[in-house]
Image (spheres, rainbow, N blue to C red):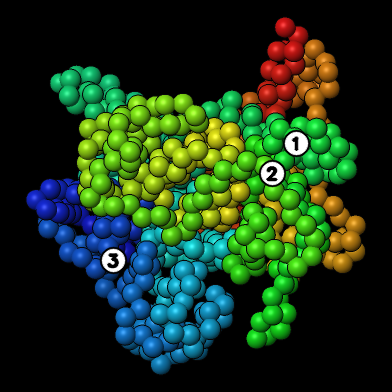
Amino acid sequence: MAPPTPITALQGVSVTFGGRPLFESIDLSLGRGDRACLVGRNGSGKSTLMKLVAGIIQPDGGERFVQPGARIAYLPQEPDFTGMKTVHDYVAAGLPEDESDELHKVDAVLDRLQVPGHLDPATLSGGEARRTALARTLVGNPDVMLLDEPTNHLDLPTIEWLEGELLSYRGGLLLISHDRAFLNRLARRTLWLDRGTVRATDRGFTEFEAWQAEVFESEEIAAQKLDRKIAGEMKWLREGISARRTRNMGRVRALQQLRRDRSENIKGGQQAKLAVAEAERGGRLVIEAEHIAKGFDTADGRKTVVKDFSTRILRGDRIGLIGPNGAGKSTLLKILTGQIQPDSGTVKLGTNLETAYFDQKREGLDPEDTIRQVLCPFGGDSVMVNGSPRHVAGYMKDFLFDTRQLDSPVKSLSGGERNRLLLARLFARPSNLMILDEPTNDLDIDTLDLLEEVLGDYQGTLLLVSHDRDFLDRLVTATIAVEGDGVVAEYAGGYSDYLVQRPDKGPAAQAAAKPKPAAQAAAPKPRGKLSYKDQRELDELPGRMDKLTAEVAKLEKDLTDPNLFTRDPAKFQKTTELLQTRQNDLAAAEERWLELEALREELEGGRG
């Protein structure tokens, strides 16, 4: 199938910063129906490349093409509200000149994004600023949308609303995002900016890691034919980045067991409390909240944040807190950690807690300090990690730094490198309770992978506020949902498990429903091997997963037809819905295979 006619394109484009080429001879095009994601490490030039497509900056070489009359809208990471008195004024500036008097469109999009038009842009929160910038991008019905980190600072309901808008959008779309779930659902095409060149594939983001591994493998073979220096660089690149993306199945199985344990704890009630009472003397209990409630008086009346919520958080639990912006996640977190008192109920904290805190603002770094000085502030070459000394050079490699950067100043690091350095310093400090408030904002995917890996090995207790669905699914043992109006409930597992377990909204259902275990898997019975039924299912699952993978690939290919929606809207809708169903079936099959495989290994180990 021929690619769609480009609405905009870059041809042979080059950009140089400080005498050093950022990228050279890049070709890139976007046509109607394109849904592409642009990926690459922080500092590789993704935002610069997007600004070139938008026409905001000019290339040092090559050409930019735009179809006459085409409308291109650009969403920057940091919107500039300079000179704008109100939100309404800012969004109205996004209307095309021939529609500048159609202000009802501004009112409509602001209503959909729930941002009051009279607000002063200078007073907006991070989430309000992002929604305002999105409104300006959407209001002009552009032919191409260029979105740089559109989900930053958005809550989950708004992210899911935006996904729906973009799925129905028929123009060309280019996305930069660290949100895997967002990219998995939207991107049909992947552009990878790597070491100054753009590689392209018609495979969606779900297949990016497999494609990246193939590229690295072929490059490593080629690098072996070059001199030792280049071969060494390729070895470091593969070991430092690509290898980390191969998921540690042992860690995944351990997380599943933790979720089963947490599920039993949630539904076990008083029995579970008695079972751990003796162990708590040794510090197993971290937080116990019983029937807590909290509210505040506001200009609009009394706002209830939480009413009659109880939980027991034990050593090693990883708890995710989710909910709309303004629902009270931060307030609940402060109650649970003893920073503010509830109006009623009690909160008991465990003994000898050492807390590490990572907030949205990110504790600053002295730009003149070197990496060595940041990690070893009292001198020497050793970092204490989990009570054991580590040489600083080895420790920094764990955070994707080249040892040659050891004495590089902070001011020479990219944004992603600074984030990794902050994480390295955080984890070098002793703690048994870690509180992470929106840690995924502004992180590149490599750093997200790294953070997930480090947190997966963390032996303490974790409280995590996040809107990143994939990150929650991969990491947490239980999810506390702050729904608003005082409704707070706990569910075993991650965000996907929460969606499955969340009771219906009807009053009768709410009264009768109780949270169910995420995996719906009972604790393994003391057997020597899998039952015949389980073994047969385990044997058949790989074939089923292969079949589902092939179906998903075919459906994704069908949807790449840019004329399908116009030619047959019903078929487009049916194919889209079937793709979502098959993707869900594949995810469920993979989860079931992991569950049965972990059970098989546990039983076979028990026989020995």
Left or right, 452 with respect to 603, comes to left
> Which residue is labeled 2 in the image?
350
Q: Determine whether 30 is above or below 201 in the image.
A: below
> Which residue is labeled 3 in the image?
54
Residue type at the position of mark 3: Ala
Which class describes the residues within 10 Å of circle 2: few (<14), some (14-19), or many (20+)? Answer: some
Q: Determine whether 522 is above or below 324 in the image.
A: above
The answer to whether residue 188 of the structure is visible from this angle is yes
Q: Nearer the viewer, residue 406 or 46?
A: 406
Circle 2 sits in a helix, a strand or a loop, which is it? loop
Which residue is pictured at 53% across the width and 79% down the height? 115
Which residue is pictured at 32% across the width and 80% down the height? 82
Label 2 and label 3: CA atoms lie apart by 54 Å
Q: Determine whether 514 is above or below 474 in the image.
A: below
For the residues bearing labels 2 and 1, Cβ distance under 8 angstroms: yes
Which residue is pictured at 36% across the width and 51% down the height? 38
Q: Determine whether 313 is above or below 360 in the image.
A: above
Residue type at the position of mark 1: Glu
Which class describes the residues within 10 Å of circle 3: few (<14), some (14-19), or many (20+)? Answer: many
Q: How many marks?
A: 3
User: In the figure, residue 234 lies in which quadrant?
Assistant: top left
Q: Nearer the viewer, residue 484 or 293?
A: 293
> Which residue is labeled 1 in the image?
280
Q: Nearer the viewer, mark 2 or mark 3?
A: 2
